[in-house]
Amino acid sequence: MIAAPLVVLALLVAADRIAATAAEHTIATRTEGYGFTSPPAVRVEGFPFLTQLLTGRLDRVDFSGGRLRLGLVTAADVNAVATGIVLGSHGDVISRLTGTGLIPFAGVDRLAQAARVPGARISAGGPHLLKVQVTFGFITATGTAALAVSGPAALQVRLVSADGVPSFLVERIRTFTIHLSALPPGVALHSVRVVPQGVVITVAGHGVPVPG
């Protein structure tokens, strides 16, 4: 007598996991609309999944390991957590989204050069510091700069040490802004830190639309 309910329960659990796996595949495909060049791994949290589906609200979805195009650069190792995903007939919306991504220094160089910093070569100088090397003609000089968020999609680089940098170059690089483009709608930069491999950005968003 006990076996039959157990079998039914096992079938329900299996059906729930199959539905969750199908949803994870669909969500991974839809991330291309954000600009992912390689889909992240997706995990739908919470059990049972079918109950969430019926109520039209997913508790949490985790994303890991994707690559996201941000204009001139591509962020690697993109990890994000989406909570309170409201499923609607006119589109799905993420109530809250947080995430991180790594912009390698080669990409930071491109962003700095786009900001008219001549021959920029940038490396790590500390958790919030950059070593900025600039080349102008036959002159190459290196300074230390602080890095901070200065807008929804912008980072400010401010020179804090310019030993050996000619005065005419100091004025050109004293403060400059590097811009990220193509952040998903409703998402903005929250914080930034420097690691040996590049710059790690943290983003946050509310009411973020899910690509169709």
Image: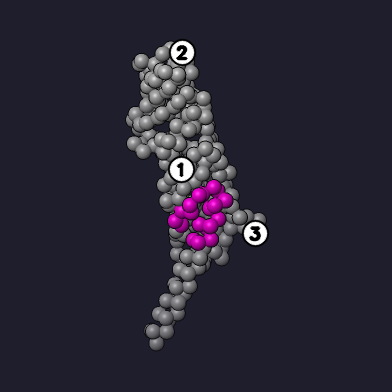
- The residue type indicated by label 3 comes to Ser
Residue annotated with mark 1: 75
Q: Which residues are magenta?
A: 24-42
Question: SS of the residue at dot 1?
Answer: strand
- The residue type indicated by label 2 comes to Phe
- The reply to whether residue 49 is visible in this rendering is no
Residue annotated with mark 3: 89
Residue positioned 58% across, 44% down in the render:
185
Residue positioned 61% across, 55% down in the render:
212
How many angstroms separate mark 1 from mark 2 (CA)?
Answer: 33 Å
Extreme residue in the right direction: 90
Neighbor class of circle 3 (other Cα within 10 Å; few <14, some 14-19, many 20+) is few
Residue 173 image point, x, y percent: 46, 20
Residue 87 image point, x, y percent: 58, 58
Residue 43 image point, x, y percent: 44, 58
How many angstroms separate mark 1 from mark 3 (CA)?
Answer: 32 Å
Residue in front for this viewpoint, 50 or 195:
195
Neighbor class of circle 1 (other Cα within 10 Å; few <14, some 14-19, many 20+) is many
Question: Going from the N terminus, do you reach mark 1 or mark 2 first?
Answer: 1
Residue in front for this viewpoint, 104 or 153:
104
Tags 1 and 3 touching, CB below 8 Å: no
Residue in front for this viewpoint, 17 or 201:
201
Residue 42 versus residue 13 in the image, above or below: above
- The residue type indicated by label 1 comes to Ala
Residue 185 versus residue 44 in the image, above or below: above
Residue annotated with mark 2: 168
Residue positioned 39% across, 87% down in the render:
1
Drawn side of residue 29 relative to residue 41, left or right: right
Colour style of the rendered protein structure: one colour
* The stretch drawn in magenta includes residue 206: no
